[in-house]
Structure formats: structure tokens, C-alpha cells
Image: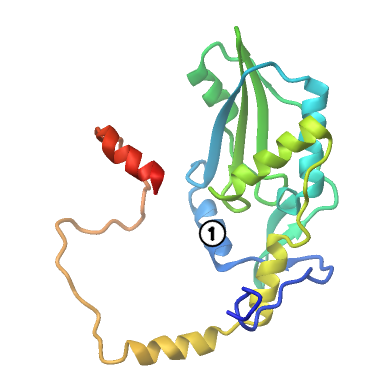
Amino acid sequence: EDGTGQAEGYHLGPAPRMELYPASALQRAMYVQSHMRQGEYMYHMPGIFFLENRPEEERFWQAVQKLVDTEEMLRTGFVVTEEGVFQKVSEKCRILPSYLTADTLEAAKEQFLRPFQLSEPPLMHCALWYHGEQTAVFLDLHHLISDGMSTPILLNRLSGFYENGSASVPEIFFKDVVYAQQKQDKKEYHKKYWKNQLSGYHRLSLLTDFARKEADLALGADYRFCVESKQTSRIREW
């Protein structure tokens, strides 16, 4: 790093205006896997947020629209050319109010979750659900445009737009970071470095208990366990 805290050689600034922007290596991999497993939801990031009070609906949907208008990733779709996978930022994306009518939470989940068209932003679904005294916001973001760290930031901005009509908006967006990285890519340098570091090592051929499947089905299971309160307190302190 240099004295500014930025990685040496990478000077971040807005990318030039382009029709298509490069996608990161991780985005390219997720895009391909998403198309290999169409109909699955492995890269969806759904969440349910219960509210203490019912929101003013017009004001709420205006806040959601402002969030999309000011956050480029929510206006980003992904397209494929002969040269690979690229990000395409739309100038406008209209958000239509959506309401869930299911009678139970489980039924509401099923009603809400649906596939994304990766070329058609926003890659975000949002809906309100009213059930008796309960009010919930259902939100689903595709992992191509969000992660566990950026989602809380988006929620804070949404709250700011709803409460105050304004929120802080960054000057640098993800496409700018990817553009800077790929423009000043030091891939060959790093490749040569690690080849030298790992020279003399041989790939291990380990026996496995089961034959490896041709495709990863991403199937999982629940594992329930108890942790002592003393341990959880130490985790919170950390």
C-alpha cells in the first residue's frame, strides 16, 4: 500500500463513460454458474425485515426508487459478447410496488422468490407483506451485485431516503473499481511470483471416501448445536 491506504499502482476514480464495463473474475464465474443452474436460487440473497409500524406506502416506494436511482449496481445488468461477460449500467430502472398476499410466512416466501433475468436490472426484488399486526419488507438481491457487507449499507440508505428524503451517495462505484483493477492489472507479475514461490512442490493425489460428482449440487443441511452463553459473550466482545 501507499501512504493513502490504497493498493500501490491502483488509483481509483470514476471510470470513463462506456456502454459496457468489465466484470470482475468472481462476477464472471457466478454468471456462468447461474446459467448452468437455471431455476436454482444459489446466488440469491433473500431477507425478511419486520417493521414496528406500517410504512407510508407512497413514501416507502419513493425511497426504494431513489435508492435504485442513486446506486449504480441496482441499475446494472450483465451481458455476454464474444469477448466475455460485461456489466451494463442503465440510466433508469423503474421500481413497481409489489405486495404479497399469502396467509402464512412460508407461503409468502414461496410467493416472493422468483428467478432474475441477469440482463434486465434491477437485480433486486422488493415487496411488502401485511399479516395481521405484522408488517415485513421482503428483499432479494442477486449476489452478482451485492454481498453480506453491502446489503446493510443499502438498507441504511433506504432508511435515510425514507426518513429524511436523502442519504449519502458514494462517488466511486463497483464498476469503477473493476475498471481500475483491470486497466492496471498485474496478473502476469503475480503469476510469475507464485510460480517461483511454489516451484518444487507437487500436486497431491489424495484418496477420497467417495467419487467426486461431475457437478456440485450445492445441497446442504441444518446442523443444530448449543453454545454456552459464556462463549457467545466472548464472541460478541471480540
Q: Is residue 95 visible?
A: no
Query: In the rendered image, is residue 7 in sight?
Result: yes
Q: Residue at x 74, y 62 (%)?
A: 172
| Amino acid type at mark 1 | Val
> Which residue occupies the foreground of this view, 174 or 6?
6
Image quadrant assignment for residue 116: top right
Percent across and percent down for residue 39 are 52, 41
Q: Position of residue 68 (x, y in %)?
A: 77, 43
Above/below status of 52 relative to 143: above
Q: Position of residue 237 (x, y in %)?
A: 40, 45
Vertical comparison of 49 with 210: above or below: above
Q: Is residue 106 above or below residue 15?
A: above
Image quarter of residue 113: top right
Q: Secondary structure at mark 1?
A: helix
Residue 136 in the figure: left or right of residue 176: left
Question: 119 or 53: nearer the eye?
Answer: 53
For disc 1, the marked residue is: 32
Number of other residues with Cα within 10 Å of mark 1, as a class: few under 14, some 14 to 19, many 20 or more: few
